[in-house]
Amino acid sequence: MRRGMSGRLLFVVIFLLLAFLVANRALVSHGSGNCLQDASSVKQKSLSEGFSEAGSRSQAENFIARCLINGR
């Protein structure tokens, strides 16, 4: 009887962990649209400050990478 309970507990723990990971990934993916919009703003701002096209694109790509890693 004891094995059945520990098996169920393990199943519930794994299920909750997977649910958390899926929810977290959905939130990060949903936020990636904001990363792209904000990166465009970063690029435009750096262009207006006199950076070259390549430098502005590099700053925007760096912003996207940081945004996606941080999830915001």
Image (tube, grey):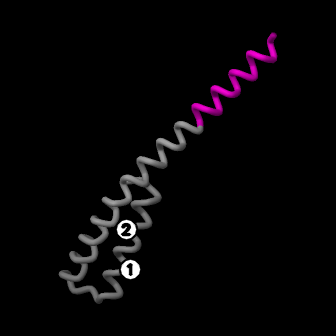
Q: For residue 58, which numbered disc appears in the image?
A: 1
Query: For mark 1, does the 10 Å Cα neighbourhood hold few (<14), some (14 to 19), or many (20 or more) residues?
Result: few
- Above or below, comparing residue 8 to residue 59 in the picture: above
Residue 48 vs residue 31: left or right?
left
Residue at 81% in and 10% down: 1
Q: Circle 1 — which element? A: helix
Rendering coords of residue 24 (x, y %)? 47, 44
What residue range appears in magenta?
1-17
- Above or below, comparing residue 12 to residue 61 in the picture: above
Q: Is the magenta stretch mostly helix, strand or loop?
A: helix
Q: For residue 4, which numbered disc appears in the image?
A: none
Q: Circle 2 — which element? A: helix
The amino acid on which the numbered mark 2 sits, given as a three-letter code, is Phe
- Residue ranking furthest to the top: 1
Do tag 2 and tag 1 residues touch (Cβ < 8 Å)? no
Which quadrant is the C terminus positioned in? bottom left
Rendering coords of residue 41 (x, y %)? 24, 70
* The quarter of the displayed image where residue 7 is located: top right
* Cα separation between marks 2 and 1: 9 Å
Residue highlighted by disc 2: 63
- Above or below, comparing residue 59 to residue 28 in the picture: below
Residue 64 vs residue 4: left or right?
left
- Above or below, comparing residue 10 to residue 26 in the picture: above
The amino acid on which the numbered mark 1 sits, given as a three-letter code, is Ser
Of the numbered discs 2 and 1, the one sitting upstream in the chain is: 1
Residue at 70% in and 21% down: 8
Q: Does the magenta stretch include residue 9?
A: yes
Rendering coords of residue 31 (x, y %)? 36, 54
Residue at 22% in and 86% down: 50
- Residue ranking furthest to the left: 48
Q: Is residue 47 magenta?
A: no
